[in-house]
Image (tube, rainbow, N blue to C red):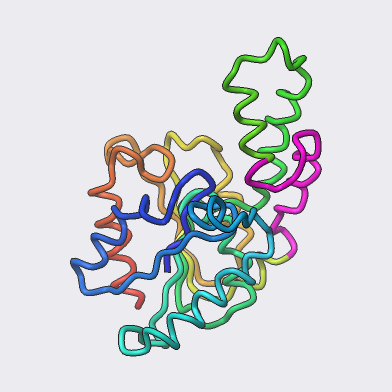
């Protein structure tokens, strides 16, 4: 099961599920609240209690796709913000055998909040257009007024639940990640069987979510999943 990120749609994870399908691994992709069609067609905005998103999707897969799903070999992968959201899902739904966090993040909300607070300090008429767009985009996807976005982001903190994750977890990182050190902090907080992997510049997968290096990244990820599942 693959959870996309904050600024992507389910189909944007194709570089992962194409490689999985080539290896005979079935994938369930979906748009959760705040993402893709769920946001645009249903008006569902982001929520931090992602266990209430992932668990119904897994229930559906086990019910409607029973012939395609081995209940003892289910993995959960999250891309970007999806890697943060999935932590609560794995903490409270013990049916996942493994999890891949790409990258891991422990307190996503506080990190984003710092950036947005700096933007809000700039008078609206003096902000570059992209800054106003960023504020509007967060307000839309979070479902709150612009001025309330920083406070709303305080809800996105997994510090109190990360120790509840029991499934073996692969935490991915990149030498050119946009939030340096966040994945390692997340890895250190986990108490489950775990593995940390840093994509360096030689791998060509050093950027956020391995942009520009999908081939070597998908090979590494799927090799790990095949071994663990």
Q: Position of residue 103 (x, y in %)?
A: 49, 50
Closer to the camera in the image, 224 or 128: 128
Q: Position of residue 52 (x, y in %)?
A: 64, 71
Residue 139 sits above or below residue 3 on the image? above
Closer to the camera in the image, 37 or 147: 37
Q: Position of residue 87 (x, y in %)?
A: 59, 64
Q: Residue most toward the front?
A: 41
Q: Residue most toward the top?
A: 126
Q: Quadrant of the C terminus?
A: bottom left
Residue at position x 69%, y 40% in the image: 139
Closer to the camera in the image, 81 or 132: 132
Q: Which residues are magenta?
A: 140-160
Q: Quadrant of the N terminus?
A: bottom left
Residue at position x 46%, y 79% in the image: 97
User: Magenta span has 157?
Assistant: yes
Residue 78 sits above or below residue 71 on the image? above
Residue 216 sits above or below residue 202 on the image? below
Q: Residue most toward the left?
A: 22
Asked whether, in this view, residue 153 is left or right of residue 91, the answer is right
Asked whether, in this view, residue 158 is left or right of residue 227, the answer is right
Residue at position x 64%, y 76% in the image: 92
Closer to the camera in the image, 124 or 81: 124
User: Magenta span has 188?
Assistant: no
Residue 62 sits above or below residue 4 on the image? below
| Residue 223 falls in image quadrant | bottom left
């Amino acid at each position: 099961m693959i959870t996309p990120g904050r600024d992507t749609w389910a189909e944007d994870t194709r570089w992962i599920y194409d490689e999985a399908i080539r290896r005979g691994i079935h994938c369930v992709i979906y748009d959760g609240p705040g993402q893709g069609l769920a946001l645009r067609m249903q008006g569902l905005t982001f929520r931090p209690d992602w266990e209430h998103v992932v668990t119904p999707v897994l229930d559906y897969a086990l019910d409607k796709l029973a012939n395609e799903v081995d209940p003892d070999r289910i993995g959960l992968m999250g891309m970007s913000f999806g890697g943060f959201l999935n932590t609560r899902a794995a903490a409270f739904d013990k049916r996942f055998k493994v999890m891949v966090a790409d990258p891991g993040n422990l307190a996503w909300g506080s990190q984003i909040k710092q950036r947005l607070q700096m933007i809000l300090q700039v008078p609206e008429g003096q902000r570059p257009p992209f800054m106003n767009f960023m504020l509007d985009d967060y307000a839309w996807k979070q479902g709150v007024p612009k001025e309330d976005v920083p406070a709303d982001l305080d809800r996105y903190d997994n510090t109190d639940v990360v120790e509840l994750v029991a499934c073996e977890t692969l935490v991915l990182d990149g030498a050119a990640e946009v939030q340096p050190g966040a994945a390692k902090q997340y890895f250190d907080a986990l108490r489950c069987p775990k593995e940390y992997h840093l994509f360096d510049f030689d791998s060509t997968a050093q950027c956020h979510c391995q942009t520009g290096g999908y081939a070597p990244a998908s090979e590494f990820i799927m090799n790990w999943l095949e071994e663990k599942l």
